[in-house]
Amino acid sequence: MTSISVLKQREKQIYQKGNQPFEMECETKSLAGAVSQRACVFCGSRVVLYPIADALHLIHGPIGCASYTWDIRGAQSSGPELHRMSFSTDLSETDIIYGGEKKLKKALLELIEKYAPKAAFIYCTCIVGIIGDDVDAICRQVEEETRIPVIAVHSEGFKGTKKDGYKAACDALFSLIERNKAPQATIPDSINIMGEFNIGGETWIIKKYYEAMGVKVVSVITGDGRVAEVQQAKNAALNVVQCSGSVTHLAKQMEKEYGIPFIRVSYFGIEDTSEALYQVAVHFKKNAEILKKTQALIKKEVKAIVPRLEGMRKDLEGKKAAIYVGGAFKAFSLIKALKTLGMEVILAGSQTGTKEDYEVLRQMCNEGTVILDDSNPLELAKYAVEKDADLFIGGVKERPIAYKMGIGFCDHNHERKIPLVGFEGMVNFANEVHGTVTSPVWDLVPRRQNTTGKEGAI
Amino acid sequence: MTSSRSYKQTPSYTPTQNACKMCTPLGATLVFQGIEGCVPLLHGSQGCSTYMRRYLISHFKEPVDIASSNFTEETAVFGGGANLKLAIENVARQYAPTMIGIATTCLSETIGDDVQLILNSMDNAINGSALVHVSTPSYSGTHVDGFHGAVAAVVDRFNPAGKRIVYRPKKKKKVNLFPGMLSNEDLRHLKDIFADFNAPVAILPDYSERLEGPSWQEYQAIQKGGTTIAAIEKMNVAVHTMEFGSVLALAAEAGQETAGDILSKRFGVPCTRLPIPIGVKATDRFLDILSQISGRPVPERYRKEKWRLVDTYVDGNKYVAKKRALIYGEEDFVVSMAGFLAEVGIVPVLCASGGKSKTFKKALEQTLPEHIIDQAVIQNDMDFTCMEETAAAMPEEVRPEIIIGNSKGYAMARRLKIPLVRVGFPIHDRIGGSRILHVGYKGAQQLYDTIVNAILTEKQTESRIGYAYM
């Protein structure tokens, strides 16, 4: 594997735990030509707002951005499914020359009449930023005409990274919440579940836990989301933020504007799920019942799943895992969850981690672990193979890298259809990992055989 | 027929709802994947390449690396030249490619970056690898236009007008084939056919190995396989060019410069345009032409395949006769698929495409008998929502009973409660999408079996009794 060399400009975004000083470079724009696994600003906005199922999501630009994001996520809805449609102004040459405002307005009015959404989000793509459409003005006009919130999401692809897209989405959400003119009426012992997108029905699992604890969920941002519910968010007593990268900006805004404090949690793995629920219970410690119920819940849930995990752990003990995810926060949870399964992490990386994130990662990992920021296929392949991974955890773009090299794979991205949060999610996760790592197919792939020939030599 | 007028009127909306097309650069990146050692590079935002990668990976289940010049706000204001150069240098360093295929995006096109000028300043090469540019503004045309544009750009680049033909081999009758967007299995089958005719062929693009290879012992920065640049450079000495696509043929007639045109105008290589060979009649035509060009009779193997196929058509004729189908996809694909359906007795009552040519209907009129054209709704520049609404509004006696197209029609098929037979590109919800064979007698055989069995499955499932015999 010495044949793969790392680009010089990328060296500072790669760290191997050991003797070298830790000076991770991160939060920079991707290097041109490096084949980053990142998407763009638009992608960041789209993933955060996507699960709001009764809103219209109209993508203003040429067709590509809408085509490639049509129904790509596993975010489920218990009711309307407008979010699973792909709407685009599909700008053509003449629109580029004469501007797309008229078409945008017409499209919006037609769609709102046809689908009667509770709000509309208009995603600005690259080109809108260039041709200078006044999308905000169109939104104001249409909002006035249709009497539903019509909100521009300034997500032009080139205006930063995916993180800036999160921020644009948070601004849109805040603008939606602000439109609720009713006075703030804080509900005791209540929370907003934030940064949770109901992939494979995960929101429902978490909601069930909070209900059992006696904590009221005011709104979920944005899993199984509804416009009216999101607009109630200011009445919650606490914001519980998962996937810290995506909605922390909103939590901070809500803290400033409405005085709602926030805590950061994760629901992946036994440890982090328990910790999350405890943190919420402790926050509402004035109500002793909640803590009591929480303890009972965790005890019951853990007891139910531990024997099921034990069996799988026997086969997974000592196996090595590589992790490459969007936000570093998820990597922390995964490292712990893998430890529960007896596995060791030999590569950990993220698209959007911060310096602090990477420091935490460094402390969590063993000597020799490779830590990567904004990596690319060649680097991921190089280190996964050098470190002899048995498992790769990532998304669609990482999957073929793993498979080509005879490495098992677990999809932990938004495309997944299986819930991985909470206690029952941990069993699903273990099953996923166990199934792929112990698959008999690895006995047949070239890299796992002691053949001397290359790729598939007979 | 009083109702015919109304059901033929398709709905029209300003926005596109569930598009039946992708943007222009995607087609170009697919072509570049079909050239040996070539790395595609998109001149635009990071998201474009990432989205197209995941779109292609989800179909092919193989690594698809596409680099990006990674626009930032400053780039958008001051121009992307510096970024493009840096991207090219980094791709060259990381991948050591034979060629970098540079496709533009809506962003770089709109700010007016002159990519060719930038590449000229680099002598159109870096460390010995060729830099080839194709203009693919996403707001103009669809992925199909990007595909044909890239094929033409590559042929143009490696067969420049002034190139002197030293020697046109007489004995080795080389043929060029521009097949359009076909599956890996299609490309492999076409290569077999040419080999059986003993006709050396240069197929552009050929991603059949690169996007469907073995597991590796060592990671391959660029997968093996693809048309070699050496083969592309020799296209001008071929005895003939074949170009698939009925709509493309009409576009060429109307003045669009195709790869075949370039070779015929510059070097006098005759070009025959024919429909994608799906079904008996279209395959007959293809093999006849190939037989003429190569000077060899159609090998026995194909005669056997043909008559086996015709015999199957006979066996299944009652199950498909007068069945009504909705077909969609790329225009050329739909035209050829419609031709196949018509020859077995299935009536394509709704032929739809997201493509924007002006000749979709004309191409279908050339392919289908008049009585089918009379009943059929033919519409391009159509999205899945309009397709669905059109199908739902059709009177029961004309409403489609089977849907044939890529996996993007699944949601529509589910709501309409009509079985979907998956063909074409993309197939995102099944394994083996790239192994679907459409062309040749063998392809028609597989399509026919699949379609008949889908109809039988539906009949069996819906039946109260569930007979165990056909």
Image: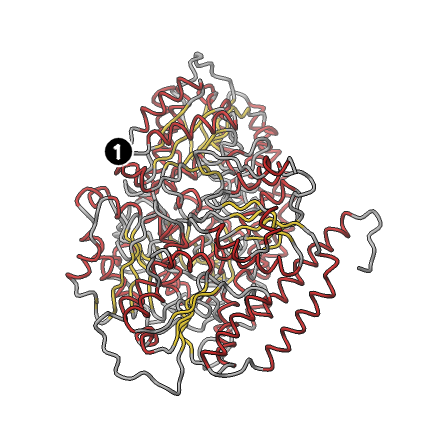
- Which quarter of the rendering shows the C terminus of chain B? bottom right
Left or right, A121 with respect to B401, comes to left
Q: Identify the residue under disc 1.
A: A132
Q: Is residue B197 above or below residue B310?
A: below
| Chain to which the residue tagged by mark 1 belongs | A
Sort mark 1 into few (<14), some (14-19) or many (20+) by Cα contacts within 10 Å: few
Residue A79 image-quadrant placement: top right
| Residue nearest the observer in this picture, B425 or B302 | B302
- Horizontal and vertical percent position of residue B176: 39, 73
- Which quarter of the rendering shows the N terminus of chain B? top right
Can the viewer see residue B84?
Answer: yes
Q: Secondary structure at mark 1?
A: loop
Left or right, A142 with respect to A275, comes to left
Q: Residue furthest bottom?
A: B171
- Figure coloring: secondary structure
- Horizontal and vertical percent position of residue A292: 59, 28
Left or right, B165 with respect to A257, comes to left
Q: Amino acid at mark 1?
A: Gly
- Horizontal and vertical percent position of residue B104: 29, 52
Can the viewer see residue B219?
Answer: no
What residue lies at 29% left-to-right and 49% top-to-bottom?
B44
The total number of labels drawn is 1
What residue lies at 25% left-to-right and 57% top-to-bottom?
B87
| Residue nearest the observer in this picture, B396 or B373 | B373
- Horizontal and vertical percent position of residue A288: 56, 23
| Residue nearest the observer in this picture, A30 or A432 | A30
Residue B368 image-quadrant placement: bottom right
Residue A371 image-quadrant placement: bottom left
